[in-house]
Image: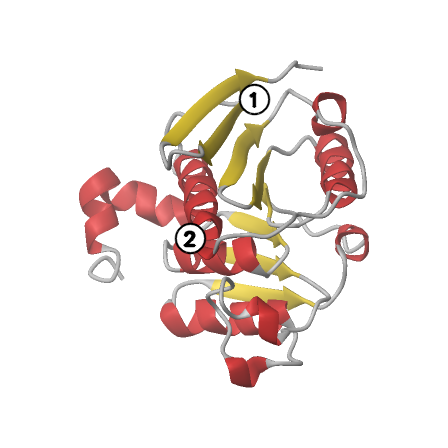
Amino acid sequence: MMQYFHRQVQLWGEETQLKLLNKKIAIIGSGGLGSSLAYALGASGIGEIHMIDFDEVSIHNVHRQIAFKVKDEGKNKAEINAKIIEQRCPYVKAFSHNCDFKAWAEKNIEVDLIIDATDNLPTRADINTYAKKKNLPWVYGSVEAFHGQVCFIEESSFSDAFKITNKTPAGIAAPIVMHIASLQANLALRYLAGLSVKKDMLYYLLFNDEGELVTQKFGLPKS
């Protein structure tokens, strides 16, 4: 096992790598962000990963949702991602849940961290309410066009910081999806490995009209 995780073991040692095997996470959404998160975290040695999504693969998903191929049309997204995780890493157990977040929450499954990979504000508000009830941290991420947002939420409240509407994202460039998911995965992995993480800080990344990458950060109010 340590040979499989050789580069990570070089980074933080065998004790921390073994610690990850006792961690459990839930990734809410198995599409664009969720697929990239499954690849990034599924082979990192986190012991138990729950993939949650009721949606099926459509042809327009494939270009930016890296777990899927054209022949996967009509298949459940969570199931595909869970299979890929276990195929790539024999030390991780992945569970798929063909349901929405509220139905998954009713299962009362214990996890150490929730990662948001959804595409709408109302569901994120539901995640926030659930996380507060369970005293759990969660990692928020969103993408649209050429920009995205990431935040490790612990003491702040998503519902207080954001106006909750039914607005859906406009067009999305495929690479920004993977970029934001990568940042989410790094925050999650650092936290689970016991490394320092800046919490309740919103990172906003965008390419401006001149093609310059701009990164801004804002402290969220704590409840």
**Which callout, 2 or 1, points at the residue further toward the start of the chain?**
2
Q: Say which of 55 and 168 sits in front.
A: 168
Name the residue rendered at 44%, 34% in the picture: 209
Percent coordinates x, y for residue 196 in the rendering: 39, 25
Question: In the image, is 205 to the left or to the right of 32?
Answer: left
Q: Say which of 73 and 40 sits in front.
A: 73
Question: In the image, is 83 to the left or to the right of 155?
Answer: left
Name the residue rendered at 23%, 47% in the picture: 9
Q: Quadrant of the N terminus?
A: bottom left
Q: Which residue is mark 2?
A: 175
Element at badge 2?
helix
Name the residue rendered at 54%, 35% in the picture: 149
Q: Spatial distance from mark 2 to mark 1, Cα to Cα?
A: 25 Å
Q: Nearer the viewer, mark 2 or mark 1?
A: 2
Residue furthest bottom as drawn: 71
Q: Which residue is mark 1?
A: 200
